[in-house]
Amino acid sequence: MRRTVAALFVLATAALPAIAGSEPAPASKHVEKTFLIPAEDGYGVGECLSGGPSECGQVVANAWCESQGFASAANYGIAAQDEYTGAIGDAAPVKSAPRPLRITCQD
């Protein structure tokens, strides 16, 4: 019984600095997330995002990322065929649709 109490005391004492916050917090990891947006989303921003790097595209991409809880857009553009469902080359498409837009957000 005495050893159990001593062991608990040692564990509690070792954990105290972490609980009290005297140890530095671990560095936050760089987080990125890519969103795929239908090219015909109804908002009329496809022209800005699909035309290559531009001030209009950066503003729209940043606004999208901020609305999703991220700091800014790392990059944006038309999604490559292997980035979205339906990318199997042998499958016959049911309906031809424009490729979705891609926005990669970062913290």
Image (cartoon, helix red, strand yellow):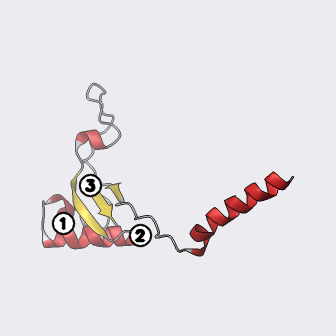
Location of residue 44 with respect to 50 vertically, above or below:
below
Residue 4 appears at what percent x and percent y? 80, 53
The residue nearer to you, when weighing 24 against 68, is 24
Tell me what residue is drawn at x 31 percent, y 39 percent: 95
Amino acid bearing label 2: Gly
Location of residue 20 with respect to 38 vertically, above or below:
below
- Residue 69 has which mark? 2
Q: Which residue is mark 1?
A: 48
Amino acid bearing label 3: Leu
Residue 5 located left or right of residue 74: right
Q: CA distance from mark 2 to mark 1?
A: 21 Å
Question: Which of the image's four quarters has the C terminus?
Answer: bottom left
Tell me what residue is drawn at x 32 percent, y 64 percent: 106
Q: Secondary structure at mark 2?
A: loop
In this view, which residue lies farthest toward the right? Answer: 1
Picture quadrant where residue 65 is located = bottom left
Q: Which residue is mark 3?
A: 101
The residue nearer to you, when weighing 84 against 72, is 72
The residue nearer to you, when weighing 100 against 93, is 100
Q: Nearer the viewer, mark 2 or mark 1?
A: 2
Task: Please tell me which of labels 2 and 1 falls first in the chain.
Answer: 1
Crowding around mark 2 (Cα neighbors within 10 Å: few <14, some 14 to 19, many 20+) is: few
Residue 38 appears at what percent x and percent y? 32, 54
Residue 50 appears at what percent x and percent y? 18, 58
Amino acid bearing label 1: Cys
Does the CB distance between marks 2 and 1 fall below 8 Å? no
Q: CA distance from mark 3 to mark 1?
A: 10 Å
Residue 61 appears at what percent x and percent y? 26, 67
